Image (spheres, grey):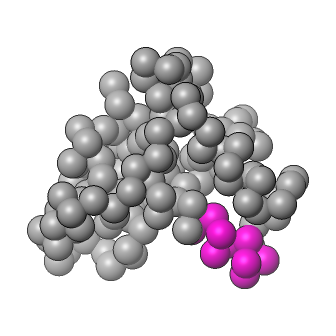
């Protein structure tokens, strides 16, 4: 299974793994060179915004934390490709307008990945596979 981390799952994986569900811990425990954790660049943007607004404190400078968090080979960063941008536009209007969630759903759909999340809106959307 290709696993795409929601922003909070990436943060918890690296700093508070006890907050992850047992199923998420199992998947993250299997991350390898052959099966890296997928992380959307939108999550890096979201982390930077949380730190900038004082809503998230990291144990090291932001840039150092981000670079360590997405270091290959265990993590593969995914940018917003033309296919992902088009998929965002194709999502139904019934989905809430949070751009981060919309990009994560589109990314999962384009890459055939399951979103690791505890966000009830993503879990309930049924627009991409999720694992809570």
Would you say 31 lies left or right of 66 here? left
Q: Quadrant of residue 98?
A: bottom left
Residue plotted at (73% across, 60% down): 63
Q: Quadrant of residue 58?
A: bottom right
Residue 70 x/y as whole percent: 60, 44
Would you say 121 lies left or right of 105 here? right
Q: How many marks?
A: 0
Q: Inspect this view and state whether residue 127 appears.
A: yes
Vertically, is 95 above or below 111?
A: below
Question: Magenta-highlighted stretch: main secondary structure?
Answer: helix
Write down the region rendered in magenta: 46-54
Residue plotted at (33% across, 79% down): 97
120 or 40: which is nearer to us? 40
Residue 75 x/y as whole percent: 53, 36
Vertically, is 73 above or below 131?
A: above
Vertically, is 57 above or below 110?
A: below
Residue 69 x/y as whole percent: 66, 44
Residue plotted at (39% across, 57% down): 79
Would you say 34 lies left or right of 26 here? left
Residue 70 is one of the magenta-drawn residues: no
Q: Inspect this view and state whether residue 24 appears.
A: no
Vertically, is 70 above or below 53?
A: above
Residue plotted at (27% across, 59% down): 81
- Viewport quadrant of the N terminus: top left
Would you say 42 lies left or right of 86 here? right
Residue 130 x/y as whole percent: 35, 42
């Amino acid at each position: 299974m290709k696993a795409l981390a929601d922003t909070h799952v990436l943060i918890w994986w690296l700093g508070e793994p006890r907050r992850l569900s047992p199923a998420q811990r199992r998947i993250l425990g299997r991350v390898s060179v052959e099966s890296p954790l997928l992380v959307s660049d939108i999550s890096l943007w979201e982390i930077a915004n949380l730190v900038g607004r004082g809503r998230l404190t990291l144990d090291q400078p932001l840039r150092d934390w981000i670079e360590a968090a997405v270091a290959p080979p265990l993590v593969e960063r995914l940018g917003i490709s033309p296919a992902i941008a088009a998929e965002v536009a194709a999502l139904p209007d019934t989905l809430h307008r949070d751009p981060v969630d919309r990009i994560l759903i589109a990314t999962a759909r384009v890459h055939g990945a399951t979103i690791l999340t505890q966000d009830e809106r993503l879990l309930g959307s049924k627009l991409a596979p999720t694992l809570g």
